Amino acid sequence: MGADASRPPSVSRVRTTQQAAQRVAVEARLRRLTAPVESGPPVARERPLPGPPPSFGSPHEAPHVVRTAVAGREPYEPVLTEEESSAVDSVDSLGARMRGRLAGAVPLLDPGVPCLRVLVVLGTLAAIVAGVFAWRSRPVAEPLTPPVPMSVSSIVAASPSPTASVVVYVTGKVRRPGVLSLATGSRVADAIDAAGGIRPGAKPGALNLARRLVDGEQIVVGAPTPTSPGDVTPAGAAAGGLISLNSATAEQLNGLPGVGDVLAERIIEFREAHGGFQSVDQLREVSGVGEKRFSEIKDKVAL
């Protein structure tokens, strides 16, 4: 058996009673700290605890006294040991420290009016900076450069000329007769000058010196002028009563069937732009001359 079993029953009861008294004292202390204080004089009664038997020790010790509060009246402070008192004091000091820290932290949470103004200004500046950054970061569409329109003169200059020159045969009373190559748009007078000019004492005869040259034509200088009016071939008229496409005027072209003022001007413009007609079939290339109209006038014209 253990050591507690060998001890007398009275000693065990004493220790149990002391422990119960200590628990009661601690509970009473805690209730006093938490419960409201009631008015009225404290009334208590004393209850002696059973002490050790007379045989336990020779002078007989006075029994411990435990004070209990009467229900409904203010409790009085019980007797606590040193360890219990230190524990209760530690709890009180910890609570006081926590209350002090909370009381000091609450003012820090309140920024106050000046600090609030500073925070508002900083927030406004941050919003402005963010807006400017977002505005500068937006994608910007590049402007499209409109195409430069080409003028009519540049288009005409870019298109190559059908013939850069005309070749004519100059003969008759000139100093250097022969085949000559002249620039497109040259006149009969230019061809005579290129052939060395008219011989002394000779005359150009019936030549129209201002007429434009036609590629492949023959120019006879000093040919005798016909004496009979019936033998004279008018300018723009070919042999056999045909109209010359390369020298006829607008009035002469108007005499052709189906040809009016507008179509006559188109024929002359085509003749000047292409350096003359190379063949009668080129009339088909003139705007307004269809197959039906060409068949009506092809037998009435010549180069």
Image (spheres, rainbow, N blue to C red):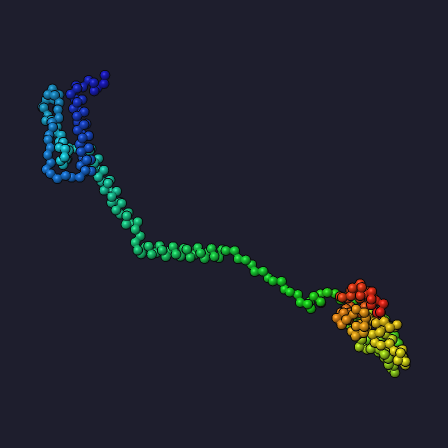
- Give the side of residue 25 with respect to residue 107, left or right: left
Residue 176, horizontal then vertical, whole percent: 87, 75
* Residue sitting at the far bottom: 201
Instruction: Looking at the picture, tell me which residue is in the foreground, 211 or 32.
Output: 211
Instruction: Looking at the picture, tell me which residue is in the foreground, 61 or 303.
Output: 303
Residue 292, horizontal then vertical, whole percent: 80, 64
Instruction: Looking at the picture, tell me which residue is in the foreground, 289 or 278.
Output: 289
Q: Quadrant of residue 184?
A: bottom right
Residue drawn 79% across and 72% down? 254
Which quarter of the rendered picture does the C terminus lie within? bottom right
Residue 9, horizontal then vertical, whole percent: 17, 19
Residue drawn 87% across and 78% down? 232
Residue drawn 56% across and 60% down? 143
Q: In which quarter of the image is residue 142?
A: bottom right
**Residue 38 against residue 271 in the figure, above or below:** above
Residue drawn 24% across and 43% down? 99
**Residue 9 against residue 68 in the figure, above or below:** above
Which quarter of the rendered picture does the N terminus lie within? top left
Q: How many marks?
A: 0
**Residue 89 against residue 301 in the figure, above or below:** above
- Give the side of residue 252 with respect to residue 122, left or right: right
Q: Is residue 265 visible?
A: no
Residue 268, horizontal then vertical, whole percent: 77, 71
* Residue sitting at the far top: 1
Q: Can residue 30 be seen in this view?
A: yes
